Amino acid sequence: MLKYILLRLLAMIPLLFVVLFIVFSLGHLAPGDPVEMMYVNVMLEQSTVTEEQKQEVRHRYGLDQPFFVQFGTYVQRLAQGDFGNSITQSRPVLPMILKVFPISAQLGLAALILLVIVGIPLGILAALHQNHAGDYAIVGGSLFLRTVPVYVLAPLLLILLVLQLHIMDVPNGWQGLLTTNVVLPVFLLMLFPLAVVIRQMRASVLEVINTDYVRTARAKGLRERQVVIGHIMRNALTPVVTEFGLIVTGLITGSVFLETIFGIPGYGQLYVNALRQRDYPLIMGCTVLAAMLVMLSNLVVDVIYPMLDPRVKL
């Protein structure tokens, strides 16, 4: 097990290098000048920013050097734990990311727990009532909610819960995970991948439900709950765990609209601002973290596989 994990961690290094090169290339090919972005507010107030001053800033951040020199310098500093400084904010990138990442991580993990509590049981119920009204209601309802964009569903829920029913105040900002402000963002964050989990769990249960060992368990007189939990669920969870490996990263890094709508200063909002301002060091820092999350989540999924199914070997 330990040898497998170490080999997988070593294999992440060249993959991360490829990701960095692609993103670094796309960032430099994209239109826009980060130095111009940095001086926008100054230029609106006073038109005294000269081209020499801009060129000095470009030289300070190495933006006047050839592409491969810039990329090599960045990789060398990254290997030493230096993520560089933000061009538009003149601050170290790593503390900026570490400040906002825990917020998005808490939202994502809360949404993941809610997704497990809601999605897996609903998928099992849909499979046990295949082609009946309950099955159609669960699958159809989850697919309908998935098709509605979050920037449409969020205002509708705010109008309903805040203006019409007066159940809650307008959730805005971040005061911690254990507050009422996060109830609606976590619920909305959970809705989008809910249909994927329900359909995958339903399909997995339908594959397992007619196997010989399930029929034998029922023939022994076991209760339906014991059959589902002890024989069906464990074997049906393996494909669903694969989906969770991809969903976790999306829950943490993909809450861009929600953080904007509810004024949450999280990772997604930081990433979007970096893209708008062409802040290359900040874009690269956010990309490094996202890529590492994807690779680590897939590693965790592979390690969990043998625990669910002893026939799987690492």
Image (cartoon, helix red, strand yellow):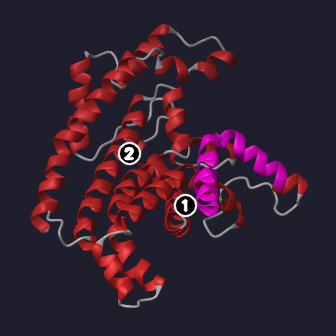
SS for dot 1: helix
* Residue for point 60% across, 12% down: 48
* Residue for point 56% across, 13% down: 49
Label at residue 290 = 2
- Which of the 4 image quadrants contains residue 230? bottom left
Per the image, the residue denoted by label 1 is 111
Residue 93 location, x and y as percent? 41, 42
Residue 136 location, x and y as percent? 61, 55
* Residue for point 41% across, 81% down: 227
Cα separation, mark 1 vs mark 2, equals 18 Å
**What amino acid type is highlighted by mark number 1?**
Ala
Mark closer to the observer (1, 2): 1
Residue stretch rendered in magenta on the structure: 132-160
* Quadrant including the N terminus: bottom left
- Which of the 4 image quadrants contains residue 13? top left
Give yes or no for residue 159 being in the magenta stretch.
Answer: yes
* Residue for point 28% across, 74% down: 212
First of labels 1, 2 by sequence position: 1
**For the residue carrying disc 1, how many other residues have a C-alpha within 10 Å: few (<14), some (14-19), or many (20+)?**
many
- Is 156 displayed left or right of 174 in the figure? right
Residue at the far front in the pictured view: 219
- As displayed, is residue 63 above or below residue 137? above
